[in-house]
Image (cartoon, rainbow, N blue to C red):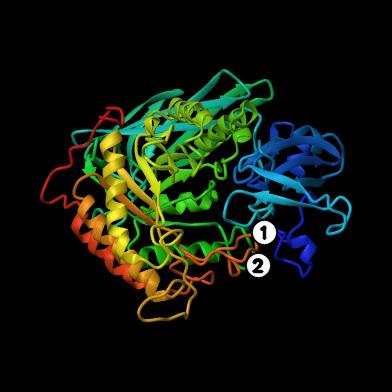
Amino acid sequence: MPVPSSFNDVGQDAQLRSFVGWVWYEREAVLPQRWTQDLGTRVVLRIGSAHYYAIVWVNGVHVAEHEGGHLPFEADISKLVQSGPLSSCRITIAINNTLTPHTLPPGTILYKTDTSKYPKGYFVQDINFDFFNYAGLHRSVTLYTTPTTYIDDITVTTGVDQDTGLVNYQIFTQGSEHVQLDVRLLDADGRVVADGAGGQGQLQVPAAHLWWPYLMHEHPAYLYSLEVRMTAQTEAGPVADFYTLPVGIRTVAVTESQFLINGKPFYFHGVNKHEDSDVRGKGFDWALLMKDFNLLRWLGANAFRTSHYPYAEEVMQLCDRYGIVVIDECPGVGIVLPQSYGNASLQHHLQVMEELVRRDKNHPAVVMWSVANEPTSSLKPAGYYLKTVIAHTKALDPTRPVTFVTNSNFEGDLGAPYVDVICVNSYYSWYHDYGHLEVIQLQLRTQFEGWYRTYHKPIIQSEYGAETIAGFHEDPPLMFTEEYQKSLLEQYHLVLDQKRKEYVVGELIWNFADFMTNQSPQRPVGNRKGIFTRQRQPKSAAFLLRERYWKLANETRYHPSVAKSQCLGNSPFTL
């Protein structure tokens, strides 16, 4: 079985494709002699993503367990590989993709007890989300080394004071309390622009180049490099560790009606995505990733949401590099049953947010956290649950706004009071009023006005769209045709163009590309709401959106030659 990949679509076995339960991976690696002989070397096993629950052994010894896909975990295996003359390292990973009401995302095991219809013990995995529950080792499994005293973590926040960039850093080390830390900040040409020493401090960068989103500035996505050098004197002798972190200097703020990046109004015009493709499932693939980024840039998209789980770290790195803004979402999708709002679910949700923030906190492209997608936020327990998760996320990272994505009515949503930005999904003339495109403008306008009147917060149309099978054509437009998808989007755009002058700060199409779902009569080989096919070929709506997004980019672009940047320096993101 190739790694990374989902195991479901690699073979020809239908039972494997829909398998629920334990699967086993095993591989032997031969380690360099230095790793196994030098006791001053720390050997670490890192798993980028194992969906859903994983148990890990090295040379038959249990080293780690982890609940939840999409986020990395690791284990120090030094003692196991340095305990004998052999340099072999047998890695065994057991993965269980079963989802329960307390997992994230949740699910339910349904036992079919009618033995006249089903074999004894027959069950199916029931889920309340609309994408296929791919499983396996979706990202790389890596062995790496550090010294026994090492740099464990770095936290960077940035601000702006007039034209001076402020880079606040905090460095965490393990292994020894007596370390020397030296810090340098280099510009994109490799020149040192600031330096410092110690575990925390502030670097000041005169005439700083700010990190701007794609198409918002003539020089987007400017990255500095923060170099951290650690030295320590241990019983075994001198030790050194070194780490380089890309840094984008930018600010994020939210007003009653605007989303501001570097003090300038930012309008999200982009997509929702999935990590999904033929054969690979959710397995990471560089060629596919670069194709998607080339399509995003062609489209004129400046943002996407990681619907509905954290994406690969390489995705986030490219977003930093190309200036694609990210709403970073945890796997809180399908939280619809009352039992999914209990304490066990809540504690796991808080842990997932800790892991997500730790992983992605230093990415300038990440401008907002999303803690859930379409929870039943009108249920009584949802209010406390969402309030707690949002407050916890804000405590972990006070520098970014926090939201969740709702499909509830503004009158009954119990989580909306706690978010900084209202993100709302609606599918007018698709899931109801089938075919009646003429009602979209009225219904969408009513939605926006109700949300803003109630909460006085900026609004993002976080999902909208229509199912479209490439090559289906009808005029006048009929559902599932390319013409219907285009016409539906055009109706939304008429209202969005009115409301973005007031308090709507973004629009994200559902979806970037067709993706796989569970089999059902409503899903002809997956969800077909993509503006691209699953093979990344454009439907008619892709050209419509391209024209719109480039027009929006030209209208909302910040021209530094006209006005000086006045960023919200060290203020909190809310005004």
Cα separation, mark 2 vs mark 1, equals 8 Å
Q: Residue beneath label 2, please?
A: 279
Q: Say whether residue 37 is left or right of residue 472.
A: right
Of circles 2 and 1, which is in front? 2
Q: Residue beneath label 1, please?
A: 5
Secondary structure, mark 1, is: loop
Q: Position of residue 340 (x, y in %)?
A: 61, 35
142 to 157, vertically: above or below: below
Q: Say whether residue 21 is left or right of residue 534.
A: right
271 to 145, vertically: above or below: below
Q: In the image, what residue type sits under mark 1?
A: Ser
Query: Is residue 31 visible to us here?
Result: no
Are the residues at dot 2 and dot 1 in contact (C-beta closer than 8 Å)? yes
501 to 350, vertically: above or below: below
Q: Residue at x 57, y 40 (%)?
A: 335
Which quadrant is home to the C terminus? top left
Q: Residue at x 19, y 50 (%)?
A: 501
Q: In the image, what residue type sits under mark 2?
A: Val
Query: Is residue 544 visible to us here?
Result: yes
